[in-house]
Amino acid sequence: MLEFIQLLKQRYQAIIAQPGKFFGQLDYQRRIDQLTLAEAFVRKGLWLAAKETPVLQVAVVGPTQSGKSSLVNALLNSPMAGVSPLAGYTVHPQGFCHKVKRADCQGLQRYFGRFQNVPPDQLSKHRHDCYAVSDTPIHSPYLPACIVWDTPDFDSIDSETYREGVLRSIALADVLVLVISKEKYADQSVWDMMAELAPLNQPTLICLNKLAEGSETVLIPSLKDKWQQARQDSFPEVIPLYYQKATATPLWPEGHKDTIAHLAKKVSPATHARLEQALLQQHWSSWLEPVRAEHQLLSDWHTLLDDALKQALANYQRDYLNHPHHYETFQQAMAELLTLLEMPGLAGFMTGARKVLTWPVRQMMKLGRKGLHLADSSHEVILLNQLAEHTLIQLADHLLDKQGQNPQNDWWQALSALLRRQRPSLLQNFETAVKTYHLDFQQDVEAAAHRLYHKLQEQPAVLNSLRATRVTADAAMLALTLHTGGIGVHDLVIAPAMLAVTSLLTESAIGGYMHKVEVHLKQQQLNAVNQALFAGYLGNALKALPGQLANTTHFNISPELLGAMEQQLTEKRHGLRLL
Ligand SMILES: Nc1nc2c(ncn2[C@@H]2O[C@H](COP(=O)(O)OP(=O)(O)O)[C@@H](O)[C@H]2O)c(=O)[nH]1
Ligand SMILES: [Mg+2]
């Protein structure tokens, strides 16, 4: 699931990074933030599941200049965090160990993943994917043993770049301390953030900083109002902190010595898995909305494709299998039959030629020229290639139509370009596949000939009358010439001697059986052509085409992967992992 969230986020980021604005861009940005938070929350879950972390994590968060760093210092009762009158001074998550050792906090690096742990004095303004954790000798009366995290602003304009650090710190926190100044508490960004954090269900404390004494009586009810608009859970405790003119640093009120320790008691790691699942479920349909839209397009494409391939197969049936002048495969079986019969007068020659004539496919491949000769002269092969070309032209037309109907969506356009680019290689591969099919199918032709041969041997009368005719010897000669490349398949089919032999057998006692063999052969051929060429090669190659669309402009997450993830999401096991 973690990988899937990362993948989804990465695709959103790639798409939003494309030049040009698009409708829904803000939604995309919000989803990236949600995915970042969810990814971090899932990471926290993995860490909890590894049972390596008894260390309480307290994160101090809030908007620009609200006094987060100052408050971290107040809590630590010591000036550890950098404070500045300049906005955006803190740009990295910075942890301060209080009565714990950094070394006791195994797994923190695994939680932070690609974020690099660096010593505090090496945090660079130019690199945001870093964090620092410092050991401190401090014993503050206001904090239990914990790591307290100073975090970047979550609202300033350029916070885009270090937003991930903020969200990582937040998802890591067992206890959240929201710092807002009286200038900032009404900012929409604060309450948007609080709303997004609701599913994390963290014990939270609000510090109202830089207050003029007494002003909290007016501010707190309005604050409560804002909270209740953003959240369903009960309004947290608010600690008013008064503006310290002289020290420029808030003082932690003595009356709230144990407040953080009390909040820490509410932390319940066992509920994490359930919360995690609820968080994912809450956003799932919105996150996957564009992925599903692509799946709809994909399924439209498959429908187009299935129709086109069905049409191609129907044309093949009409123009080859059922075409009285073009169908030649059965005649080839007849030619095979004649070579099996060892006609008088030809017998000696035929016995010599036998080795060449019996053609298991591999052997025929070795013969090369003859195989090629058969394929090249085959009307079927030419027709199949024409049908493939025609199908691709038709599909290209359909894609243009789709593009016209959905000008706001570039999926069809991209697919159309992809098809245009791949057309030559698709056709070339199809041609190769046709040759392979054609050679392979000679086995079935051979089998049909053998079936007729055995039937004939049960019918000595027919066999004798066949052998008695001069025309049969001529036809056998022709069949032989076909094998050696002397004539093409079509010439064989229309040769009078062959036609005469065919009609002789059709009129004979095995006529009915011959018809059955022919019908069976056609059916096999239809299946083989569909399986190897239309639904098979062409269908598979074209169905895979959208998978090659650029990942920077399309999500390209397969329905199969999404299905597997959804199953994981709804599985009870996942939610009950730690319950
Ligand atoms: N005078 C006074 N200044 C404060 C107080 N709390 C914070 N500040 C100032 O507000 C500015 C921003 O504080 P800082 O902790 O860096 O805010 P952050 O950006 O949220 O981390 C600094 O110049 C602090 O000195 C206070 O109680 N009194
Ligand atoms: Mg700061």
Image (cartoon, rainbow, N blue to C red):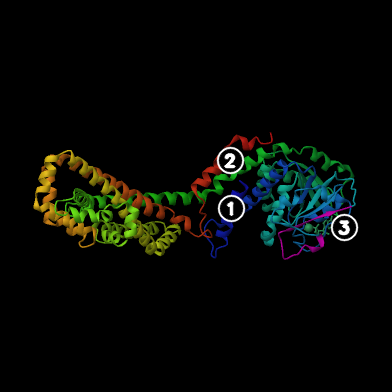
Q: Residue at x 73, y 46 (%)?
A: 223
Instruction: Tell me which amino acid carries mark 2.
Output: Leu
- How far apart marks 2 and 3 lie (CA) works out to 52 Å
- Mark 1: few/some/many CA within 10 Å (<14, 14-19, 20+): some
Q: Which disc number belongs to residue 245?
A: 3
Q: In the image, 66: left or right of 137?
A: left
Q: Quadrant of residue 131?
A: bottom right
Magenta stretch in the rendered image: 120-136
Q: In the image, 519: left or right of 181?
A: left
Give the labeled residue for mark 2: 569
* Mark 3 or mark 1, earlier in chain: 1
Q: Answer yes or no: do the residues labelled 2 and 3 have beta carbons within 8 Å?
A: no
Q: Which disc number belongs to residue 461?
A: none
Q: Position of residue 312 (x, y in %)?
A: 29, 53
- How far apart marks 3 and 1 lie (CA) works out to 49 Å
Placement of 122 over or under 147, stated as above or below:
below
Q: In the image, 61: left or right of 342?
A: right
Q: Position of residue 214 (x, y in %)?
A: 83, 47
- Nearer to the camera, 357 or 182: 357
